Amino acid sequence: MPPDLSPYYRDLTFMAPLSEERASALCGFVAGNARGTVVDVGCGWAELLIRVLERERNVKGLGIDLNADSVAHGRALAQERGVADRLSLIAGDVRKHLPKSAGGVLCVGASQIWGPPVEAKQPLDYRSALRALRALLEPGCPAMYGEAIWTATPTPEAIEPLAGRADEFVFLPELLDIARDCGFAVIRAHQATVDEWDAFESGYSARYARWLAEHAEDHPDKASVRARMLAQSNAYFRGYRGILGMAYLELLAS
């Protein structure tokens, strides 16, 4: 049985390389243009959706994620921050619970919902995701779409711990073309900095470091947890750091 690691939200505010400043701008864009209910696809613990509701009291929120623990934490956060009466969070499959329409959409790192499973190690299907999001929205409604891209020519060391292929992701100009082809007007494009990535990767791996610090050296899981920590650290710092990027697009349905 795997060891009981701390949840990601203990060390991460967002499950993505995202600074407070950038998150504020993205949530402000959605809040300022949303109508009715904003849907967060793959919401995690719904931090971004909660911030949208804090910014605009005339909208409601619906978040959907497979991770029941994250959803439970999101409900607790919503209660603490006074938006629980306007927020519904569902632990389940997005494809089963997605409504027919929405007044705004958040989708960060969840494109695989509409494409091949991650285990298939195929190119990321941005187009199917963006088409599905566009189908929810009336013209003029906002979408904030965040997804992985390449920011430099992928090296063998970068692609090896990912899907093992150089065509897994596209570059930002190609993603902008895809978004426009799928019926969106691109209002603003953001790209995560290396500092944002360093903070995210450190927070992502902190659960391993915490576990190692809290357990004796002779614990039977010590070697496996240390190996997982080193694998993640090496994948990033010796692999895709500065090569794998993250784009955040402010979009309006056109």
Image (cartoon, grey):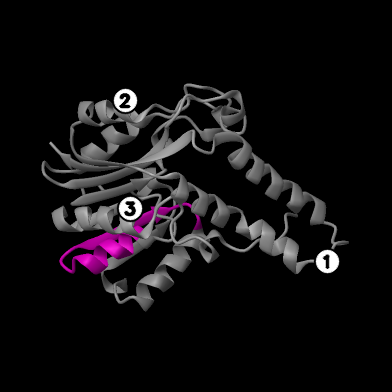
Q: Is residue 16 visible?
A: no
Looking at the picture, how far across and down is residue 202, in whole percent?
A: 57, 54
Few, some or many residues within 10 Å of mark 1 (<14, 14–19, 20+): few
- Which label's residue is closer to the chain start, 2 or 1? 2
**Whether residue 245 is situated above or below residue 108 in the rendered picture:** above
| Residue 174 disc label | 2
Q: Secondary structure at mark 1?
A: loop
Few, some or many residues within 10 Å of mark 3 (<14, 14–19, 20+): many
Which residue in the structure is indicated by mark 1? Answer: 216
Which residue in the structure is indicated by mark 3? Answer: 40
Residue sitting at x 38%, y 43%: 95
| Quadrant of res 130 | top left
- Which label's residue is closer to the chain start, 1 or 3? 3
Q: Secondary structure at mark 3?
A: strand
- 55 is within the stretch colored magenta: yes
Q: Is residue 81 left or right of residue 177?
A: right
> What range is drawn magenta here?
48-67
Q: Amino acid at mark 1?
A: Ala
Residue sitting at x 44%, y 50%: 196
Distance in Å between CA atoms under marks 1 and 3: 40 Å
Q: Is residue 121 left or right of residue 79?
A: right
Residue sitting at x 73%, y 65%: 213
**Whether residue 151 is situated above or below residue 69 in the rendered picture:** above
Residue occupying the far right of the picture: 218
Q: Amino acid at mark 2?
A: Glu
Q: Are marks 2 and 3 in contact (CB under 8 Å)?
A: no
Q: Is residue 83 visible?
A: yes
Q: Secondary structure at mark 2?
A: helix
Q: Is residue 119 left or right of residue 185?
A: right
- Which label's residue is closer to the chain start, 2 or 3? 3
